[in-house]
Each structure stands twice: as structure tokens, then as C-alpha cells.
């Protein structure tokens, strides 16, 4: 009887830890994206901000159509080719800000976080 209860607690704890780890990966990736964005030249940053204002509506539409798997693959592609991050995002109609928002939205849901992490690992 006690062994069954202990096993259930362990299983729940393992599931909770998996959820926490998935959230950590999503947060780490988001931070890495910020670091990547911060390493750019100031002039490029100003141009990006101006472009972000003009393409916000199209980025929002594209963001809503992306699955966690799509976001995971995009994240892995950016990790492999960090200098091409803006190009990779613009191909999907995203900006750095809209991509970050989409990743954060996925991170709020444990099931979507798992799907994101699995796609990210598979594409890496």
C-alpha cells in the first residue's frame, strides 16, 4: 500500500520535473535569442525596430498559424545559423519580437512545451 503511494508520488514528481525542464529549455532559448539580438550593430537594430513596427500585423497573423513544432524547427535553425536569424524569421513572416511572444505562449502550456522541445531537439 505504501509502495503504491510512493510510486505514484515519484511518477508525479518525474512528470513535474519533465515539465519544469521543458519550460527551462524554452526560457533558455528565449534568452539566447535576446543575446543574439543584442550582439548586432546598433544601426541594424534601429532598422529592425522600424521594420517591426510596419510588419506587426503580418507577424501576428503568421505567429498564430505556427505550431509548437514549427517554432521548434525555427529555433533550431536559428541556433545552427545565428547570423541569419532575421532572414529565417522573415521567411516565416516573423520578427524577433513576435517569435519571442510565440515561444512564450507555447511555454505556458506543458503539452505544447514538450512538442516544442521535441521538435527543437530533432531539428538540432
Image (cartoon, rainbow, N blue to C red):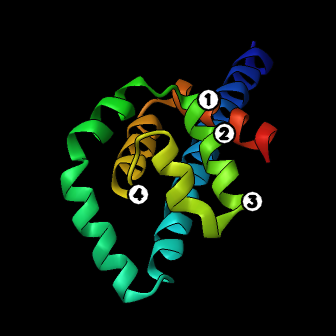
In this picture, is 90 found above or below 70?
Answer: below
In the rendered picture of this protein, how many numbered marks are placed on residues? 4
Alpha carbon separation for disc pair 1 and 3: 17 Å
Residue at left 51%, top 25%? Answer: 67
Q: Is residue 17 visible?
A: no
Labelled pair 2, 1 in contact (Cβ < 8 Å): yes
Residue density around tag 1, few if under 14, some if 14–19, many if 20 or more, within 10 Å: many
Q: CA distance from mark 4 to mark 3?
A: 16 Å
Q: Which residue is mark 3?
A: 80
- The answer to which of marks 4 and 3 sits earlier in the sequence is 3
Picture coordinates of residue 29, whole percent (x, y): 57, 58
Q: Which residue is mark 4?
A: 96
| Residue that numbered label 2 is attached to | 73
Location of residue 120 with respect to 65 vertically, above or below: below
| Structural distance between the alpha carbons of marks 2 and 1 | 6 Å
On residue 19, the disc is none
Q: Residue at x 54, y 73 (%)?
A: 36
Label 1, secondary structure: give it: helix
Q: Residue at x 61, y 44 (%)?
A: 74
**Label pair 1/4, CB-CB below 8 angstroms:** no
- Give x and y (percent) for residue 94: 40, 45
The quadrant in which residue 111 appears is top right
- x and y, in percent, of residue 58 in the image: 28, 37
- In this figure, which residue is indicated by the disc labeled 1? 69
Q: Earlier in the sequence, mark 1 or mark 3?
A: 1
Q: CA distance from mark 1 to mark 4?
A: 18 Å
Q: What separation in Å lies between label 4 and label 2 (alpha carbons)? A: 15 Å
Amino acid at each position: 500500500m505504501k509502495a503504491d503511494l510512493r510510486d505514484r508520488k515519484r511518477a508525479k514528481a518525474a512528470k513535474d520535473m519533465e515539465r519544469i525542464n521543458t519550460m527551462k529549455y524554452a526560457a533558455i532559448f528565449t534568452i539566447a535569442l535576446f543575446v543574439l539580438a543584442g550582439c548586432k550593430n546598433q544601426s541594424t537594430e534601429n532598422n529592425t525596430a522600424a521594420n517591426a513596427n510596419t510588419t506587426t500585423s503580418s507577424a501576428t497573423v503568421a505567429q498564430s498559424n505556427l505550431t509548437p513544432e514549427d517554432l521548434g524547427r525555427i529555433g533550431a535553425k536559428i541556433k545552427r545559423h545565428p547570423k541569419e536569424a532575421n532572414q529565417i524569421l522573415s521567411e516565416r513572416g516573423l520578427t524577433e519580437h513576435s517569435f519571442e511572444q510565440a515561444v512564450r505562449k507555447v511555454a505556458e502550456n506543458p503539452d505544447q512545451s514538450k512538442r516544442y522541445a521535441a521538435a527543437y531537439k530533432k531539428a538540432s
